Amino acid sequence: MTAPNDPAAANDAGAGADPGTDKDVAAPQDRELPQLLSDCVHCGFCLPTCPTYVLWGEEMDSPRGRIHLMQQHVEGAPLSAPMVEHFDRCLGCMACVTACPSGVQYDRLIEMTRAEVEQEHPRPVAERLTREAVFRLFPYPRRLHALRGPLRAYQRTGLRRLVQRSGLLGLLERVSPSLAAMERLAPPLGKAQPRLPERVAARGERRATVGMLTGCVQREFFPDVNAATARVLALEGCDVVIPKGQGCCGALSLHAGRQEEARAFARRTIETFEDVDVIVVNAAGCGSAMKEYVHLLSDDPAWAERAKALSAKTRDLAEYLVELGPRAQRHPLPVTVAYHDACHLAHAQGVRSQPRALLAGIPGLTVREIADPDVCCGSAGTYNLFQPEAAAELGDRKAADVRATGAELLVAANPGCAMQISDALARRGDRISVAHTAEILDASLRGLDRSALLGRLT
């Protein structure tokens, strides 16, 4: 096995190789979990912000209830199947973190608890196989790339319509809800785009040099978002460094409790971007995970300082552009958009005003707010694959709120949210295009007109 800190492993991670593990590193939760649990005063402010509590009204499906279960486990209660189910039902959206007046770090609590679940709880065989399939595919861009051709053929030849009309999809729902969710959520795929160059030069006087994370799902399913991100940064005076060998940042693994896997991905990402001063990320879940490296590797003496440095220089695209300040001319773009707050952007990173400020700076653009913006859309990384029924309920709620705005276009800064809300809108018969903040900015900076923007996104 290649050592996790071998530079060649960084290239392999992008090529589809599995990461190494670090079994010898002590788990931080052994001493941190009890301390964090004591911060909760059980006030209940988190209840109305929790999506699963809003859906079902069950105490054990609220952050307060789950913290109570965590405390039971710390005191010696085994991780029973019902207890694990309540932890699995948590989206990890972090709305409760925003709402908590006591500063409870529920994000840390649920991630450490999920790590214990993965280590201690034997899942049923079918569930274990489904989870392994997901985590052997989605964090590996080249594996996703290999899937593109067959998936595009399935979508473009009419086979997908035949499956949907024949009732086979309903049969798949009964056999494997997770596989059916994957089929529904897959975005329409165009032709494969050329790989971005390793360096995109600044337009005009160079103001900064930044590294850019291309991601996994973002890179293979939403390549136009990455291309738009690079163009916007270049037009704002940035040299954009896009390392060829980059792979997964570890977000999906980290948020699912697969900590050994996440640490290996984190080390490789640190090595890949160590020579740049700022790393710009255009996917909310990825940016959140990279900012958490400081905690993820805090007990690893060889990596703790390097992880802290990377977390400190990671910026969401909107966050960085507002820090940098506008230079390129914004051309009018007379479109009405609704802005969706991705949970790992708004709650986990605290980035709320910056995307709105960027959109407000575009002449002619009208931004409409969505009701209950703090309630998750149901995507939550792999949640809509492992908890498809709850995710669909939340998606339907979000789609109705989006439709109520009357907007022509939905803006979302996370690929999972884009797929989740697009699927929910389609189930309602609504055909509202979904765009990334970078794509809207790109259209304005390049002077695209309204019809060109909407036509390109349809």
Image (cartoon, helix red, strand yellow):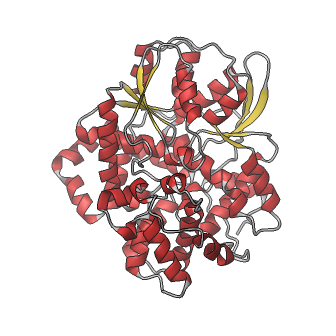
Q: How many marks?
A: 0
Percent x, y of residue 86: 40, 70
Q: Quadrant of residue 308?
A: bottom right
Give above or below for 261 relative to 440: below
Percent x, y of residue 137: 50, 57
Percent x, y of residue 200: 71, 27
Give above or below for 448 relative to 324: above
Residue at the (43%, 75%) spot, across then down: 84
Does residue 24 show up? yes
Give above or below for 420 relative to 136: above
| 328 or 365: nearer the viewer | 365
Residue at the (59%, 73%) spot, across then down: 38
| 331 or 152: nearer the viewer | 331
The C terminus lies in which quarter of the figure?
Answer: top left
Residue at the extreme left: 166
Residue at the (47%, 60%) spot, across then down: 134
Percent x, y of residue 311: 72, 50
On screen, residue 327 versus residue 116, left or right, reads: right
On screen, residue 170 versus residue 18, left or right, reads: left
Give above or below for 15 relative to 3: above
On screen, residue 250 versus residue 412, left or right, reads: right
The N terminus lies in which quarter of the figure?
Answer: bottom right
| 290 or 36: nearer the viewer | 36
